[in-house]
Image (cartoon, rainbow, N blue to C red):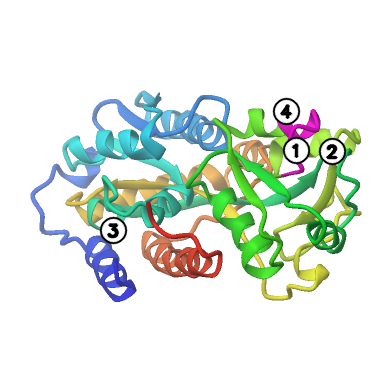
Amino acid sequence: MPLRLIASLLVAGALTSSATAAPAIDEFPSRSVRLVVGFAPGGPADAIARIVAQGLSELWKQTVYVENRVGASGAIALRTATNAPSDGYTILVTSNSQIVSQLMAKTPSYDMVQDLIPTINVGSTPMILVASNALGAKSLKSVIELSQGRKLNFGTAGAGSAPHLTFAYLLNGLAHTDSSHIPYSGAGPALNAVMGDQIDLAGLALTPVIPVAQSGRVVPLAITSTSRLADLPDVPTVAEQGYPEFESSTWIGLFVASGTPRAINDKINASIQQVIDTPSYREKIKGQGFTLEGGTASQFNSFVIADFKRWQSYLEAAGIKPE
């Protein structure tokens, strides 16, 4: 999809007319609300969804529950959310992996920019590149040197995920290592594979890797954030290792179906902002390894537009064609 069309459609979605027929804003929500998650229980999106659901339940005095609809790279959850009435009672919780999956599909089964309206970006977390102990790599430079004598491979949580595209771009688009991607069914299996020396490298979301890296069961090579992390202070960023413009992260955001009245979306946004501004919930989200983002629905809309452009540029630089 051309980027100009992506931008125009997102803006159109974000500015859905508040004149659309809807219940009085003061009455919302008058019944239970579900948060639909396209990822398995225990993952980052699920964890953030459950924290937000608890906070909203307390704030709204209504039941807010999480429903995991896993499969088809998040498309099942997206369709569940968009096939429901556009009234704010069904909210999608997803990540930028949903953007990546759409861009990597020649004929995607969904279109985020037409089917959804951005509500709020709850938080973001960087990714990390780690090596097996058997590989003998200690830095990105050593990975590049090793790649000159053999073909390397790297595992991620799945084809079409944000880590897949991030590390394909880094290893093949920037570092020119010609490494092969090995997709797994989740971060856990990929992490187990690199710990067991079954693969050379793994590119993963940060949170599950921290204790493994601290224990020496994998070798942490690079963080994709703009600065080093307190939990792994000796691990340099990608930018420090010769790629100064490089930065990538996984974010978890909430969306409502296209056609949802703006007033309802703005109320959901304000309510979630109130939840994540509450110290106890703020600490819970940080405990998942996330930096809090927040902001207005309009700001998140602009962010998503920019993210589509960024991931498309990564796709092109990595030489990955939609399939």
Tell me how far mark 1 sits from mark 2, CA to CA: 9 Å
Report how many numbered discs are placed on residues in the image: 4
Judge by depth and name the residue closer to the eye, 197 or 303: 197
**Closer to the eye: label 2 or 3:** 2
- Tag 3 or tag 1, which sits nearer the N-term? 3
The residue tagged 4 is 192
Tell me how far mark 2 sits from mark 4, CA to CA: 10 Å
- Tag 1 or tag 4, which sits nearer the N-term? 4
Outermost residue on the front side: it is 149
The residue tagged 3 is 113
Answer with left or right where residue 81 lies relative to residue 143.
left
Query: Percent position (x, y) of residue 96?
Result: 47, 52
Q: Amino acid at mark 3?
A: Val
Judge by depth and name the residue closer to the eye, 165 or 249: 165
| Magenta-drawn stretch contains 145 | no
Residue 218, numbered label? 2
- Tag 3 or tag 2, which sits nearer the N-term? 3
Few, some or many residues within 10 Å of mark 3 (<14, 14–19, 20+): many
Range of the magenta residues?
193-201
The residue tagged 1 is 209
Residue 27, can we see it?
yes
Tell me how far mark 1 sits from mark 3, CA to CA: 32 Å
Q: Amino acid at mark 4?
A: Asn
- Tag 4 or tag 3, which sits nearer the N-term? 3
